[in-house]
Image (tube, rainbow, N blue to C red):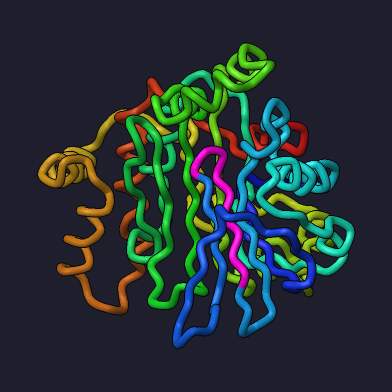
Amino acid sequence: MLCFDKLMIKTSINNISDIGDDFVANIKNDVIISHRYKQEMPLLKIRLEHGHDELIIEFTSKLLGDDMIYLINQSNIRQCLDNINALGCCHLAVDAILNEAEVLRCDVTRDVLCSDISKISNHVATHIKNNKKWVCKQYQQNGVVLENVVSTARCKKRLTIYDKHKELSKSRNRDYLNGLSAKSVVEDFYKDKIRFELNLNSKEQIRKNLNVEETTLVKVLAACGNPILNILDEVLCQPVSCEEIQGLSLRDYERLAFLREHDNDLQKVEMKVRSLVSCNTSINKTMKPYRELLGRLNQNISVISFPALLKESA
């Protein structure tokens, strides 16, 4: 069963009623174009588009309160919508939304047990197959973000890996945590938990990565598979085992000097390599010895097995 930290869903405007004064009207030429409601913590955005008869709702797993540790899934989606109704800002037709809504955006999420985010981050940064197709950036203090290099937003994929316990400890979450009845349970759950968060920001990306023909809420929540692991398989090359590695050769020392000249940054190295070789040269093959050498330099960092880390039981 897939879990999500964030969902944006669209349904008929007929599935909302009794909107309160907290909704802000957008008026043009004396005609109400839309109504908007926004709450920062936990995040909740509601938009009524009167011209298109659409209701768009965006929310995160924090809306579940003490149950946020379970993320949004097939079993608790009704609870999410019931909790919106409990706020008193409006009334949602929960059954109709569950049956009719479609997903516009979603964050597929896994929280895994790992005590050292640096091991994962270093592994990801040093094992990218092609730095021209994928970019690795630092996220927060020790996390990383993987993004594919594309020109259109509907093809964009973004995988963020970070220490969830540290993120939850930030000041912006303090009031939210203090309002939970099981604050200590939630905090204890996220100790040594690393979050993998795959942002899918178009229906096309949702269909491809979740392997669903339709982006209805029912189909998306029932999707199977492991899209996060699929992305990592697409982006990362296989690490070289210690058995394959012996001492440094003269050629290795030459490559080492080249790595150091570019701050041991494989993205910088690849850019330089591309400027020196012909367009017919296999960049993946040319970069392989540099990745292997950098892996040798980081032998103190254990090899990460993402299939084991991201197995189905979180």
Relative vertical location of residue 182 with respect to residue 294 in this rendering, above or below: above
> Front-most of 46 and 115?
46
Magenta span of residues: 40-48
Can residue 302 be seen in the rendering of this structure? no
Rendered residue at 63%/60% (across/down): 8
Q: Quadrant of residue 32?
A: bottom right
> Front-most of 274 and 185?
185
Rendered residue at 76%/49% (across/down): 81
Q: Quadrant of residue 210?
A: bottom right
Rendered residue at 31%/38% (across/down): 294
Can residue 226 be seen in the rendering of this structure? yes
Give x and y (percent) for residue 111: 62, 33
Give x and y (percent) for residue 99: 87, 64
Left or right of 70 on screen, residue 59? left
Rendered residue at 62%/30% (across/down): 112
Quadrant of the image for the N terminus?
top right
Quadrant of the image for the C terminus?
top right
Give x and y (percent) for residue 24: 51, 62
Q: Is residue 64 magenta?
A: no
